[in-house]
């Protein structure tokens, strides 16, 4: 009996698209469905770091930290347009962890993960360093170490784009409503959330990578009895006007043993987060609470000389992390490592459930998933993603400035900020997007912030953008500076463009 796909993936977050990309690149026929937009859940609500997780060392998660640290430079090399190094300043708080413990932890952080390109840790005299200027005078010494920044939602979209370029069928806004084994294969029903149209697909292997909804899919879609595998943990962030002018980030310890970050964000802002609290509700309804806002403001104000008040917050975002429920007593102690669970008797179509994980380790998770999948379906191609650039990332990992200079020479009419933003977003594919444009007017209507009709059309055609929200909050972060009138104008234009023949 003909089968549509070797592999069907439920979930368009980073784990789902990572598995789809890896499988397609090995020669498997792949389909992926996502009930909303790509990266519309946890994968666009992270702190946007490619990092080892310094604090996980205190919970003895050495293997997780090592695995994550080893991915930093791999991912940076794969996508140097959306991933780049940052330096983090850790002030020594005399009332909390002793300096020798911080120094030892950072020594491990430097040397257990195969660091080659990233600068090593160093001690800082905060009385003399520029990074000490925004802090209270009591913080006189600290440390500086390396991790990386990532545009998280673009990482998801670029993995999906590469999967599609390698033959995968990517179906955003298609919900898997039912899946059952029949005659040794999966019969999978999907519903187009825009039109209501239903379709049936067949596959030899099914992957449940639906993040916070993984147990819901197991129960409602697959008919399992009262599944409970994940612990839903809410993480919230606040964005305030820029607090400091330098390019360093801060990691702050708190008396409750949590840590928060303060990170330069979108040129004009500072991002502060995250919280860690168990979440009992529907993941679709997650939103920051007044208590979380006050907590983040108070925690940052413990260090910054100028206090941060809740009324300074101009934007917030929250997401639910689907952590594997390992029975930890506190949310911040629950493991961030992934757990892969294969279900199915010998000879029947198998199911692979994905629990937990970090955006940093998504590529390793995909490789581990493919090892299981190949155990059922057989091998088709080699392991390949370690040295494979994501779309637009085919330039040297330290070559962004040279690429930006080339863009500015090729398109001198672009404003400096517009050229920088677009080169960061699209890398080398900016030349395909802009084509032979010779003046700003060639790009069509400007919706604000340098977002033009040419770019919006590209995102609709090549990156599955369907709504203004898709573009303003996931394909870019331009929504922070957009007025309601500008958002409505963009939405109206997109609606007309979608209807055009």
Image: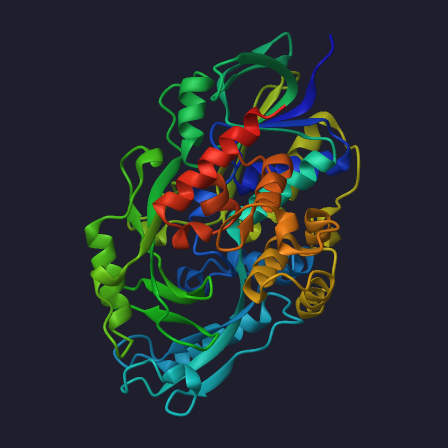
Tally of numbered tags: 0
Residue 272, quarter of picture: bottom left
Judge whether residue 323 can be spotted in this image.
no
Give 414 or 380, whichever is nearer the viewer.
414
Report the residue at 38% width, 19% height from top: 225
Left/right of residue 125 with respect to residue 187 in the rendered view:
left
Direction bottom: furthest residue: 128
Give 419 or 19, whichever is nearer the viewer.
419
Residue 188, how many percent across, how many down? 56, 16
Give 318 or 392, whichever is nearer the viewer.
392
Residue 190, how many percent across, how many down? 53, 17
Left/right of residue 481 with respect to residue 301 in the rendered view:
right
Residue 359, how many percent across, how many down? 52, 50
Direction right: furthest residue: 381
Residue 400, quarter of picture: bottom right
Report the residue at 47% width, 15% height from top: 196
């Amino acid at each position: 009996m003909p089968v549509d796909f070797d592999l069907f993936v439920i979930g368009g977050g980073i784990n789902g698209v990572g598995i789809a990309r890896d499988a397609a690149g090995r020669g498997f026929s792949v389909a992926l469905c996502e009930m909303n937009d790509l990266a519309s859940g946890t994968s666009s609500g992270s702190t946007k770091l490619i990092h080892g997780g310094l604090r996980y060392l205190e919970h003895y998660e050495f293997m997780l930290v090592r695995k994550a640290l080893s991915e930093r430079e791999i991912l940076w090399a794969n996508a140097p347009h959306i991933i780049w190094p940052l330096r983090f300043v850790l002030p020594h708080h005399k009332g909390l962890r002793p300096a020798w413990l911080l120094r030892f932890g950072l020594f491990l952080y430097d040397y257990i993960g195969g660091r080659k390109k990233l600068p090593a840790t160093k001690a800082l005299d905060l009385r003399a360093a520029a990074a000490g200027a925004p802090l209270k005078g009591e913080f006189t010494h600290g440390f500086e170490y390396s991790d990386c920044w990532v545009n998280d939602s673009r990482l998801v979209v670029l993995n999906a784009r590469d999967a599609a370029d390698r033959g995968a069928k990517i179906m955003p806004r298609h919900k898997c409503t039912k899946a059952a084994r029949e005659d040794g294969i999966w019969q999978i029903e999907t519903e187009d959330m825009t039109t209501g149209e239903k379709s049936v697909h067949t596959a030899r292997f099914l992957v449940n990578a639906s993040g916070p909804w993984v147990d819901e899919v197991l129960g409602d879609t697959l008919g399992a009895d009262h599944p409970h595998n994940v612990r839903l943990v809410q993480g919230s962030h606040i964005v305030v006007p820029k607090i400091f002018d330098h390019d360093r980030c801060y990691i702050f310890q708190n008396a409750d043993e949590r840590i928060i970050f303060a990170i330069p964000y979108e040129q004009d802002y500072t991002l502060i987060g995250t919280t860690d609290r168990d979440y009992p509700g529907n993941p679709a309804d997650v939103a920051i609470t007044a208590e979380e806002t006050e907590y983040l403001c108070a925690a940052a104000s413990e260090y910054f000389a100028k206090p941060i008040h809740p009324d300074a917050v101009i934007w917030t975002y929250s997401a639910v992390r689907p952590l594997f429920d390992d029975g930890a007593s506190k949310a911040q102690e629950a493991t961030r490592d992934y757990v892969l669970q294969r279900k199915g008797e010998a000879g029947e179509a198998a199911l692979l459930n994905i629990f937990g994980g970090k955006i940093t380790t998504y590529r390793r998770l995909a490789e581990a998933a493919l090892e299981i999948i190949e155990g059922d379906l057989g091998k088709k191609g080699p392991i390949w993603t370690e040295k494979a650039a994501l779309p637009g990332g085919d330039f040297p990992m330290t070559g962004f400035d040279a690429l930006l200079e080339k863009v500015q020479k090729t398109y001198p009419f672009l404003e400096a900020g517009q050229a920088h933003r677009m080169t960061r977003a699209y890398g080398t594919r900016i030349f395909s997007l802009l084509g032979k444009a010779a003046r700003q007017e060639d790009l069509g209507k400007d919706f604000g912030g340098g977002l033009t009709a040419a770019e919006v059309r590209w995102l609709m055609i090549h990156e599955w953008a369907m709504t203004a929200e898709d573009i303003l909050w996931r394909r870019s972060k331009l929504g922070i500076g957009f007025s309601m009138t500008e958002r409505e104008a963009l939405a109206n234009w997109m609606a007309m463009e979608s209807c055009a023949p």
